[in-house]
Structures are given as structure tokens and as C-alpha cells.
Image: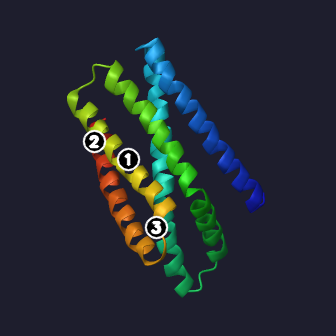
């Protein structure tokens, strides 16, 4: 499969996740709490986790690529292709993950009677994800030149804080 075809599928999948999560966000308020809905929103949370980890892995793959490039690693071309795909689709993957997290979080925050540790750790994680997404949008639209590098470092720092909050939420959930 060529890189261009794979790129189209990633973009298509991201838009599908965005649309489904937006619909589920509304559906959760209409139907209310049921076992089926709780299970469905658990799966949406898993999609959000996968998307967040995938978007975050751009940073890790970049660091790996730079280290392996120095050592003339044999599979460098594959790692470079993965980096290009992640970099090209980082934004759509991040937005899809955010909307999945928003649907998951809003349902469980408003519909269930879970333990407070799970709810508040999830709420803190969702707020952190919102800050990360908002700053990423700002970075994408406004930052240029030397400011871009400084803002990118801030975006990376926020992603570390978000990753820690997500880890805490997953440990309690």
C-alpha cells in the first residue's frame, strides 16, 4: 500500500471517528445511562487513549529517527515513513482523540455514579487534553518562526502533563 493511499485512509478514519463521537455525544444525553451505553462509551474511551498515544508517539518516533539516523540503521526508511505519516496526520488524530475523550468523559461525568477518584481524574485529564488541543490549535494557526519553536516546546510540556494525568486516570479507572 502506498503512502498516499495510507494517508487517505488515516484522514478518512479520523473524520469518521470525529463524526461518530459527535453523534455519540448527543446520543448519550438523549438515551441516558444503560449497560449498553456504558460499554459503548468505555470503547470510545479506548479509542481516545489510542489516538492520544498515537499523536504523542510523533515525538518519540522523531527522537528515535534522529538517533538511528546517526547510526545508519537499516530500517531507517520505514521509521522515516512512519514519522512522515504521524506528522502529516498528527492534527486529525489529535482532534479525533479529543472528541472521543470528550464523548467518553461527558457521558461518564453526567450519567454515571462512579467513584469520585475515577470521575475527577478523568475530568482533570479531559481539561488537560482540552488545554493541549487548544494550545495545539493556537500553535498551528498563529506561531511562526522562532516563536514556533518556543510554542512547540510548551505544547510538548503540556503533552507530558496530559500524559501523566491520563496515566493516573487509567490507574484509577
Instruction: Tell me the residue at 38%/47% (across/down).
Output: 129
Rendering coords of residue 66 (x, y %)? 51, 79
Badge nearest the viewer, 3 or 2 = 3
Q: Looking at the image, which is closer to me, 6 or 151?
A: 151
Q: Quadrant of residue 148?
A: bottom left
Q: Is residue 55 above or below residue 171?
A: below
Q: Please report contact status of discs 2 and 1: CB closer than 8 Å, yes or no.
A: no
Q: Which residue is mark 1?
A: 129
Q: Secondary structure at mark 2?
A: helix
Query: Residues under labels 2 and 1: Cα distance?
Result: 9 Å
Q: Is residue 158 above or below residue 107?
A: below
Q: Residue furthest front?
A: 142
**Residues tagged 3 and 2 counted as in contact (Cβ below 8 A):** no
N-terminal of the pair, mark 3 or mark 2, is 2
Q: Name the residue at 68% across, 44% down.
A: 12
Residue 38, percent across and down? 43, 21
Q: For mark 2, what is the residue?
A: 124
Q: Residues within 10 Å of mark 1 (few under 14, many from 20)?
A: many
Q: Nearer the viewer, mark 1 or mark 3?
A: 3
The quadrant in which the N terminus is found is bottom right
Q: Looking at the image, which is closer to me, 156 or 144?
A: 144
What's the residue at 49%, 22% (across, down)?
26
Mark 1 lies on a secondary structure that is helix
Can you identify the residue that label 3 sits on?
143
Residue 121, picture quadrant: top left
Question: Which residue: 54% across, 86% down?
Answer: 71
The dot on residue 30 is: none
Amino acid at each position: 500500500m502506498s503512502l498516499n493511499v495510507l494517508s487517505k485512509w488515516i484522514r478518512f478514519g479520523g473524520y469518521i471517528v470525529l463524526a461518530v463521537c459527535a453523534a455519540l455525544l448527543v446520543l448519550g444525553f438523549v438515551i441516558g445511562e444503560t449497560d449498553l451505553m456504558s460499554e459503548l462509551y468505555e470503547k470510545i474511551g479506548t479509542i481516545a487513549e489510542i489516538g492520544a498515544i498515537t499523536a504523542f508517539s510523533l515525538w518519540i518516533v522523531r527522537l528515535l529517527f534522529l538517533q538511528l539516523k546517526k547510526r545508519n540503521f537499516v530500517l531507517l526508511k520505514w521509521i522515516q515513513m512512519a514519522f512522515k505519516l504521524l506528522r502529516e496526520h498528527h492534527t486529525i488524530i489529535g482532534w479525533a482523540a479529543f472528541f472521543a475523550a470528550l464523548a467518553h468523559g461527558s457521558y461518564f461525568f453526567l450519567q454515571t455514579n462512579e467513584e469520585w477518584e475515577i470521575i475527577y481524574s478523568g475530568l482533570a485529564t479531559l481539561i488537560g487534553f482540552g488545554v493541549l488541543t487548544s494550545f495545539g490549535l493556537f500553535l498551528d494557526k498563529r506561531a511562526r518562526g522562532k516563536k514556533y519553536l518556543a510554542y512547540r516546546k510548551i505544547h510538548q510540556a503540556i503533552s507530558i502533563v496530559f500524559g501523566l494525568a491520563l496515566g493516573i486516570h487509567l490507574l484509577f479507572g
